[in-house]
């Protein structure tokens, strides 16, 4: 099993940037593909980005492509998402998740392990 703790959320002005981190503990971090998801109030949780075990492959939701960058440091057991050009519609609770599937999974059901989330608020 793997435990996940997100950090880095906060309030940012529209157009600004934030970097979220997710620290993993427990099993071998490099055994897991990692994903970021988000959930805004009153909406379903949605996929944001994912990264493969070794970091060679990434995948993004269309809504964040070219603005967000997912990365991982397996030596630090940490996955990141750099968020640039933030918009009010990016405001949500952001969750990281771990999957033992290969590649860059996008479905919530592919991820059995989840963090508690970190809040991102974007002012207009």
Image (cartoon, rainbow, N blue to C red):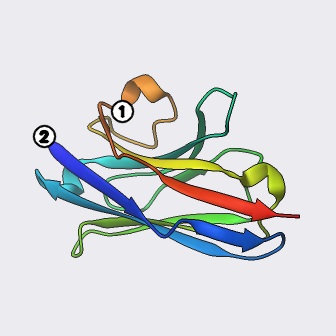
Closer to the camera in the image, 42 or 77:
42
The residue positioned 53% from the left and 50% from the top of the image is 94
- Answer whether residue 66 is visible to the viewer in this image: no
Write down the quadrant of residue 76 in the picture.
bottom left
Percent coordinates x, y for residue 84 in the rendering: 72, 72
The residue positioned 80% from the left and 49% from the top of the image is 89
Picture disc at residue 4: none
Q: Quadrant of the N terminus?
A: top left
State whether residue 23 is above or below residue 15.
Answer: above
Residue lying furthest top: 109
State whether residue 11 is above or below residue 116.
Answer: below
Question: For the residue carrying disc 1, how many other residues have a C-alpha within 10 Å: few (<14), some (14-19), or many (20+)?
Answer: some
Percent coordinates x, y for residue 17 in the rendering: 69, 76
Percent coordinates x, y for residue 33 in the rendering: 34, 47
Residue bearing mark 2: 1
Give the side of residue 20 with respect to residue 16, left or right. Answer: left
The residue positioned 39% from the left and 59% from the top of the image is 6
Picture disc at residue 111: 1
Closer to the camera in the image, 48 or 30:
48
The residue positioned 36% from the left and 33% from the top of the image is 111
SS label for mark 1: loop
- The alpha-carbon separation of the residues under discs 1 and 2 comes to 12 Å
């Amino acid at each position: 099993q793997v435990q996940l703790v997100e950090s880095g959320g906060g309030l940012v002005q529209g157009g600004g940037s934030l970097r979220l981190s997710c620290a993993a503990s427990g099993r071998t971090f490099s055994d897991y593909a990692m994903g970021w998801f988000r959930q805004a109030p009153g909406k379903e949780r949605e996929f944001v980005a994912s990264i493969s075990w070794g970091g060679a492959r990434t995948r993004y939701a269309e809504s964040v492509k070219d603005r967000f960058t997912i990365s991982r440091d397996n030596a630090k057991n940490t996955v990141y998402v750099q968020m640039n050009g933030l918009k009010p519609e990016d405001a949500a609770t952001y969750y990281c998740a771990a999957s033992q599937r290969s590649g860059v999974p996008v479905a919530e059901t592919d991820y059995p392990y989840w963090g508690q989330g970190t809040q991102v608020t974007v002012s207009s």
